[in-house]
Amino acid sequence: MTDYNFAYLDEQTKRMIRRAILKGLAIPGYQVPFASREMPMPYGWGTGGVQVSAATLTPEDVFKVIDQGADDTTNAVSIRKFFQATAGVDTTEETDKATVIQTRHRIPEAALNEDQILVYQVPIPEPLRFLEPRETETRKMHSLEEYGLMHVKLYEDIARHGAIATAYAYPVKVEGRYVMDPSPIPKFDNPKMTMPAIQLFGAGREQRIYALPPYTEVVSLDFEDYPFEASKADHSCELCGADDSYLDEVIVDDQGGRIFVCSDTAYCTARQAAQQDTPTPQAQEAAV
Amino acid sequence: MYVAVKGGERAIDNAHAWLGEERRGDHDVSELSVAQIREQLSLAVNRVMAEGSLYDPDLAALAIKQARGDMIEAIFLIRAYRTTLPRFAGSEPIATEKMACDRRISATFKDVPGGQILGPTFDYTHRLLDFKLAAEGGLSDAPEGDAQQGDVPHVLSFLDGEGLIQQEKQGANTPPDLTREPMELPANRPLRLQSLARGDEGFLLSLAYSTQRGYARNHAFVGELRIGDVPVEVEIPELGFAIEIGDITVTECETVNQFTGSKTESAQFTRGYGLVFGMSERKSISMALVDRALRWEELGEDNLGAAAQDEEFVLSHCDNIQATGFLEHIKLPHYVDFQSELELVRKLRRDTMAGADSTPAQEAAE
């Protein structure tokens, strides 16, 4: 595909997106409007993340794409192929080898480092959207730091259910200022968000970019007597035995039989490979 | 032993190959050419150009072929292609009074200078299936007349002379560009009209219909509807004057709406405006009605809480490419989110059950 510019977007557009990214990094958690372009994949399928990645990638980068934590889910494959074709960058499935990681709905299990950028695909960037549908209103609420509505919602959850009934896209507060939507990651991933890597969030259809510089303080909203809890299925991975990773439930027969496996395929594969190198799992357990 | 699902890449390739085969259909039936679509499905081509925001009948016909006739998919193909095109210049505003009209009707006056021209309309056809078309069709010859000479004045300009219709303010500023800047709300009228011009025909039709049925009713007359070719002129900086770069077909609708006056305005007629690429009557009339409904604030009318009056609602939801993308994305895997919901629902149910079991004991303690 030589007809297109490096990473598909023209340089003018990339510059416009980079400006939005820089502004986002300067005001962590603030949603920066940007003139999102129509991409050759549908809105809602990662166009925001794709545009941010396109503006971020350089020819030397090594790119990884995950969807639901996995490298081989269909849309991850599709986006990886898109950048292979339009940017010709090297791709990898190994988290530590990647310099730019585009993700949908997960943060990798392996800790990221200062040389990495994590790009999130965001469907609805506005954490207050389901409490107040109007953009004109929610922008005002952010500028006035008026987050009472969110606290009331969380309180009502507790009053009604005895717990905060949000399992993913769990709202966070950034550096004590902006309430931010972490994208629909499970709340298990929320504590990882204070990290050495840069985190960029792209919402194409909603025309918003926001960002977290390295080591930004990200706090999941909660109450003193109902503290935030990062939950996962109370099992360990059937394939690699990990008990510290987020698990997918897989139905294996029509009797309702089910097992649990790591959602992060790269993490799981690496652990399985390491176990095969070691003579016995017991020996490895002992070493750990 | 469970083995995790792999092979997304091969599945995608196979799915695309199958799609190509389905697109072609039965090989015993001759293949449709892009030129046939352009010439014989021209209203479909027009819709794709209008909502795709790109005036190119050949590309629109190609998109329809590639999309297997799915209009929104075809519009999407055109939009995605459009983004990759460089922008050389902005045209001068088109002068629709200079239109070479194929059709021009007014519902407000029996006769108007320039005359009523029915043009190629479905309006008075009887909707009876024409089985001759299924057999051969053949050539149909329409009688020819002399082309109109000179400009065709806008019907609403006659009301203008009497001061009976609200004057449109001259905007001095360059209008904002929806495709280059993020949408900002509240939007001004040029931005609204841009958004409506590329908005989904079905969505605008239903909204316009809702105003007719009483949700922010504003009885509209079609003051004028005209379809025809207009020249597009671009000013070349080196030359210092505008030159004509080609013709486009557009449909323009101006409505005259009842208005009894408000606190700030004296009684006069008001306007709604619709302009769409190609021959697109339904869309342009719908656009004019929705435009008029959205102008309530400017005209000092009451907000009746109707959907068609709600700018943020209309503009945020009229784009079918945004809508279809987001709607269809729920087909993508969501098992991580679903898993977290599953855990939560199980936990809440566990807590409730535990609560139910312990209720009598609690009561006893109290």
Image: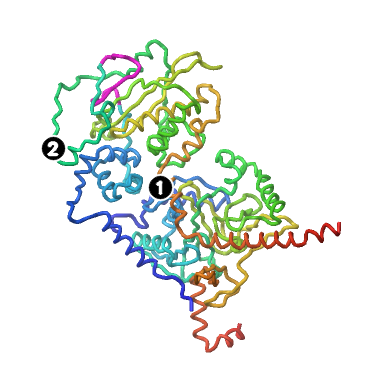
Q: Amino acid at mark 2?
A: Gly
**Amino acid type assigned to the residue bearing label 1 in the image:** Arg
Q: Quadrant of the C terminus of chain B?
A: bottom right
The residue labelled by disc 1 is A37
The image quadrant that residue A135 belongs to is top right
Res B41 seen here: yes
Residue B57 versus residue B67: which sits nearer the camera? B67
**Mark 1 falls within which chain?**
A
Is residue B84 shown to the viewer in this render?
no
Quarter of the view holding residue B38: top left
Badge 2 marks a residue whose secondary structure is loop
In the displayed structure image, the side of residue A259 where residue B220 appears, left or right = left
Report the Cα–Cα distance between label 2 and label 1.
45 Å
Number of numbered discs overlaid on the protein picture: 2
The answer to whether marks 2 and 1 sit on the same chain is: no
Q: Which residue is pictured at 43% across the width and 67% down the height?
A: A72
Instruction: Write down the region rendered in magenta.
Output: B95-113
* Residue B46, image x, y percentages: 29, 38
Mark number for residue B253? none
Residue B121 picture location, percent across and down: 26, 28
User: Residue B197 falls in which quadrant of the image?
Assistant: top left
Q: Is residue A176 above or below residue B320?
A: below
Depth check, mark 2 against mark 1: the one in front is: 2
Give the chain of mark 2: B
